[in-house]
Image (spheres, rainbow, N blue to C red):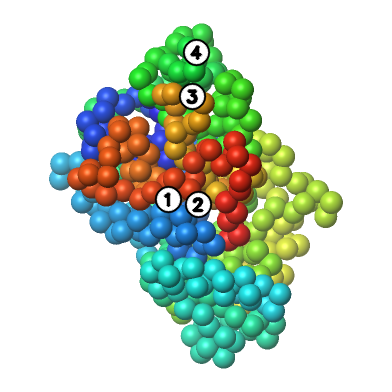
Amino acid sequence: MIVGAGVMGAATACFLARDHGAAVTLVERDPSFARASSSLSASSIRQQFSTAVNIALSRWSLEFLRRVGAELAVGDDHPAIGLVEPGYLYLARADTQAQMRTAHALQRAAGADVVLLEPEALRARFPWLATDDLVLGSWGARGEGWFDGPALHRAFLRKARSHGARIVHGEVAALEASGERVRGVRLADGSLVTADATVLSAGGWSSTLAATLGLAWPVRPRKRDVFVLDSPAELPGCPLLIDPSGVWCRPEGRGFLAGAPPRPVEAGGPGDPDEPDLQAIDHALFEEVIWPVLAARIPAFEALRVRSAWAGYYEMNDFDHNGIAGAVPGWSGLWTACGFSGHGMQQAPAVGAALAAAVAGAGAGAASPVPSIEPLSPMRLVRGEPLIELNVI
């Protein structure tokens, strides 16, 4: 049984049913996924992380996404997710260039095609970019870009169903255990759903359910606003751009998407409380933070207007900004995949495959090699040993 049918749960269900012949039930409180992170993600993929496990997971996922039409085909229906790979471009001033160089060495050692560009090279490749205050840029020449995340989510669910997986509509109120073994879940209507194995993948609400077993997990839903922009600007070769301020933008159709970390309470912003209202878009964040940064960094963006906006949740792991995935220590029959802090969509294929193999008990001799998720084990929470990810957007 999988608690949560978002993209992480759907991917795990797909690999369990397709590759291991498991009978899978997904329990989902909102089958429309209207407020799910999977439906509201900006759906990008990169290799520019500061931890080796994240680089490896995204590289594995990228290869899966490149062949997704064959991997998730159902009969003659081959899903398309519109994957494009213009790269990510991280920009650095003097105070962060050392961190960028350290991460670059790790990324290159892992096989990522990432290039460091000094200001002159930045201007040559991206002539529309203002570089006067920059000392360095890190650009993914291959293997980074964006795709249709909801289409990937639907394809995982469809493929899982084609191999016998089923979705049960219900609100999980608690994890049910007998001794130290998790036996299933109790729904809000009082009914019990039992299973030999339970995977907790309820996004930002996973910690609430983990607490029913006495587990204190640092995972919370955090709101992120995304703005859809119209501009006559032509930006040849525009990647997903991350300014040193944390403001980001990328092309989307004939326009652009942009966002930034939410403003802290002490700066006069609304803050980022648990489960904030997704309908309450912080338009002042755009006017006061995002637009001034974009106009300075890309002068052609002086002519810019907001067409629309939406907000979604990050399942933010405040412990170290990395996913929590694997067997839950102290409890047999329980696994988890949550807390990916904004990079869950891109890593769902890799994590889903690895977690499915772990749940099914598939060893190293399995027919299809899967990436290691050992560094993301919940055991690090028990030990108080964070695996810090610095490149969080």
Quadrant of the rendered structure where residue 285 is? bottom right
Three-letter code, disc 3 = Trp
User: Which residue is more in the foreground, 242 or 306?
Assistant: 242
* Residue 138 in view, yes or no: yes
Q: Distance of mark 1 from mark 4, alpha carbons?
A: 33 Å
Labels 1, 3: front one: 3
Checking the image for residue 70, the label placed there is none
User: What element does badge 3 sit on?
Assistant: loop
**Residue shown at 50% from the left, 73% from the top:** 105
Three-letter code, disc 2 = His
How packed mark 1 is, by other alpha carbons closer than 10 Å (few <14, some 14-19, many 20 or more), is many
**159 in relation to 266, above or below:** above
**Residue shown at 61% from the left, 22% from the top:** 214
Q: Do the residues under discs 2 and 3 have CB atoms within 8 angstroms? A: no
Upstream in sequence: badge 4 or badge 2 = 4
User: What element does badge 4 sit on?
Assistant: loop
Residue 244 drawn at (x, y percent): 66, 70
**Residue shown at 60% from the left, 27% from the top:** 215
Q: Is residue 37 left or right of residue 25?
A: right
Q: Which residue is mark 4?
A: 179
Q: Distance of mark 2 from mark 1, alpha carbons?
A: 6 Å
Q: Which residue is mark 2?
A: 343
Q: Which residue is mark 1?
A: 347
How packed mark 3 is, by other alpha carbons closer than 10 Å (few <14, some 14-19, many 20 or more), is some
**225 in relation to 50, above or below:** above
Residue 139 drawn at (x, y percent): 49, 75
Q: Distance of mark 1 from mark 3, alpha carbons?
A: 25 Å
Q: Which residue is mark 3?
A: 331
